[in-house]
Amino acid sequence: MTTAFDPIELGGKRLANRIAMAPMTRSRAYGPGATATELMATYYAQRAGAGLIITEGVQPSVIGQGYPDTPGLHSAEQVAAWRQVTDAVHREGGVIFAQLMHTGRIGHPSLLPGGLIPVGPSAVAATGQVYTHQGPQDFVTPRELEHQEIVRTIADFVDAARNAIAAGFDGVELHGANGYLIHQFLAPNANQRTDAWGGDVAGRVRFAVEVAAAVAEAIGAHRTGIRISPGAPFNDIAETDPADLEATYTALVAGLAPLGLAYLHVLEGPDQSLTARLRKEWPGTFVLNPFTHPAPTGQASLGLIEDGAADLIAFGALFLANPDLPRRLASGGPYNEPDPATFYGGDERGYTDYPALPA
């Protein structure tokens, strides 16, 4: 019987276990030009006991930034700064993928230089607010991307993926979840286009598939994963028609499957039957961030590996409070309780002062 503590091959790397650290925005790129810092290197190195670390969302371009103090991978300075992070993780024996996150319509002009405004598949504003250094701000109506700008955006993902490899990452994860740009193209309420990039299911999945194909060609499919969140309402996404939801995500998986990607990462919603279908239809490694709301993913989810529901399980909040989480899971705890007040920003809790297990 396979367990969460058995190794697995992924992208040419041997993972020590099947426990992944889920991507979590931290907003701690305080270096000049949205660069990674020594504190970030400490944070990720402490969690190198994970079989796979997936970083916080990293913008692939200037206009892809939607939150303050998030890191990028679109400049030479950013590539150099990430080296301290990847080197620190590798010294501890870890494997780390960079999550490439273009936020699309989620953001605000005050976060962007030169009078830029957020972009999206359609000029449809998301309901809600985003935090900025000036306080919460309403989302604005994004500028609809033209065809050539979509092509350029795909190229931005490719450039960022190449930069990630140059920075020492073992691969990249494309963020197609949580209401950001790739997800916006998938969702009928955010994508109201009538051209080849929207309309029917084939049009709405096109952007995701073309980004994945282009990145896989550039850095290798074995270094490329993608994360999706079918039906998740984050950032004013409305995928409320069950038939369309199933048609969209089965078509997406069918489009991605021939690429031979390193993995498919599913952030599960309440509809676990769709998860089971995607698991069945995906031919490669299946990473699952299971639906455990309102509790964080915990010990009980390890059984999903034994049941064959997933190849790796991704843990989020519990990894913030427990840098040595795989060790705690192996021993059945105890666990430090996550403190929501430290999820974002500069508070150093979550690095060294959560109680550690004895050596």
Image (tube, helix red, strand yellow):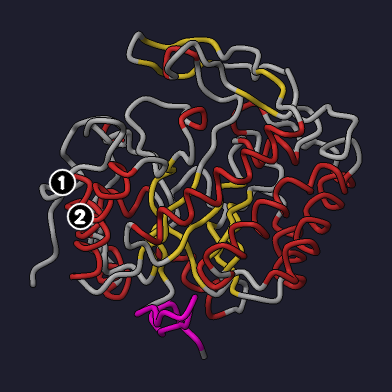
Left or right of 348: which side holds 28?
right
Residue found at x 84% / y 36%: 198
Q: Is residue 61 above or below residue 324?
A: above
Question: What secondary structure is the magenta-colored segment mainly?
Answer: loop
Whole-percent x, y for residue 38 in the image: 15, 46
Outermost residue to the left: 359
| 279 or 177, nearer to the observer | 177
In this rendered view, identify the residue nearer to me: 273 or 346.
Answer: 346
Q: Name which residue type carries label 1.
A: Glu
Look at label 2 and name its amino acid. Answer: Gln
Q: Nearer the viewer, residue 318 or 227?
A: 227
Q: Position of residue 56 (x, y in %)?
A: 39, 46
Q: Residues within 10 Å of mark 2 (few under 14, many from 20)?
A: some
Q: Which residue carries the number 2 mark?
A: 84
Secondary structure under badge 2?
helix
Residue under pointer 1: 38
Q: Residue visible at 51% across and 56% down? A: 173
Number of callouts? 2
Which quadrant of the figure contains the C terminus? bottom left
- Residue 263 against residue 320 in the figure, above or below: below
Secondary structure under the numbered disc 1 in the rendered image: helix
Q: Are marks 1 and 2 in contact (CB under 8 Å)?
A: yes
Which range of residues does the magenta coloring cover?
A: 2-16
Instruction: Indicate the quadrant where residue 242 lies.
Output: top right
Asked if residue 67 is positioned above or below residue 241 in the image, the reply reads: above
* Spot occupied by residue 180 in the image (x, y as percentages of width and height): 59, 36
Query: Is 315 situated left or right of 306 in this image?
Result: left
Residue ranking furthest to the bottom: 1
Whether residue 97 is situated above or below residue 6 in the rendered picture: above
